Amino acid sequence: MTDVTTQLNNLAAAPATGNRARTSNWFEAFASAWGSALDKQADVIEQQAEVLKNGGDSPSQITMLTAESMRLSFMSQSSHTSLDSISKSLETMARKG
């Protein structure tokens, strides 16, 4: 999740009129940061699966693949929860505004 934090910090530091990494608002940047973090974790899983595919199917390697898969699941759930919470907050603010 450090990647998400770094990307959000970079977004916060960007000038208000500057190009914000191909997004038009901070909510899209937030979603993009989560997407990047999930993509990187998926890459880790693919690399670990390659190890198994190439004959490294020891119990420790299988356990590592399982752990990395569970990490992706946790990250995916966290991204959904945070994006859902923010979108509900924005909806509430829009109704009150």
Image (cartoon, grey):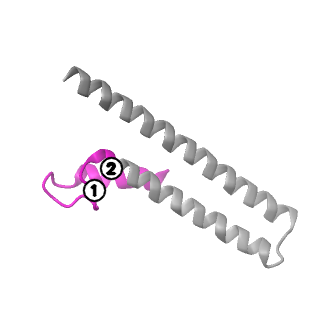
Asked whether disc 1 touches disc 2, contact meaning CB atoms under 8 Å apart, the reply is yes
Residue 36, numbered label: none
Give the distance between the C-alpha atoms of the residues marked 1 and 2, in whole angstroms.
6 Å
In-image side of 87 versus 42 (left or right): left
Q: Quadrant of the C terminus?
A: top left
Residue at 84%, 77% (x, y): give it: 55
Which callout, 1 or 2, points at the residue further toward the start of the chain?
Answer: 1
Residue 23, numbered label: 1
List the single residue furthest toward the top.
96
Number of residues whose C-alpha sits closer than 10 Å to that of mark 1, classed few (under 14), some (14–19) or many (20 or more): few
Examine the rendered structure and indicate whether residue 89 appears above or below residue 69: above
Residue 28, numbered label: 2
- Residue 90, image x, y percentages: 30, 31
Three-letter amino acid code of the residue under disc 2: Glu
Residue at 24%, 53% (x, y): give it: 24
Helix, strand, or loop for circle 2? helix
Which residues, given as a range, are shown in magenta? 1-28
**Of residues 23 and 2, which is closer to you in this image?**
23
Based on the picture, tell me whether residue 12 belongs to the magenta stretch.
yes
Residue at 28%, 53% (x, y): give it: 11
Based on the picture, tell me whether residue 11 belongs to the magenta stretch.
yes
Three-letter amino acid code of the residue under disc 1: Thr
Number of residues whose C-alpha sits closer than 10 Å to that of mark 2, classed few (under 14), some (14–19) or many (20 or more): some
- Residue 76, image x, y percentages: 56, 47
Residue at 33%, 49% (x, y): give it: 28
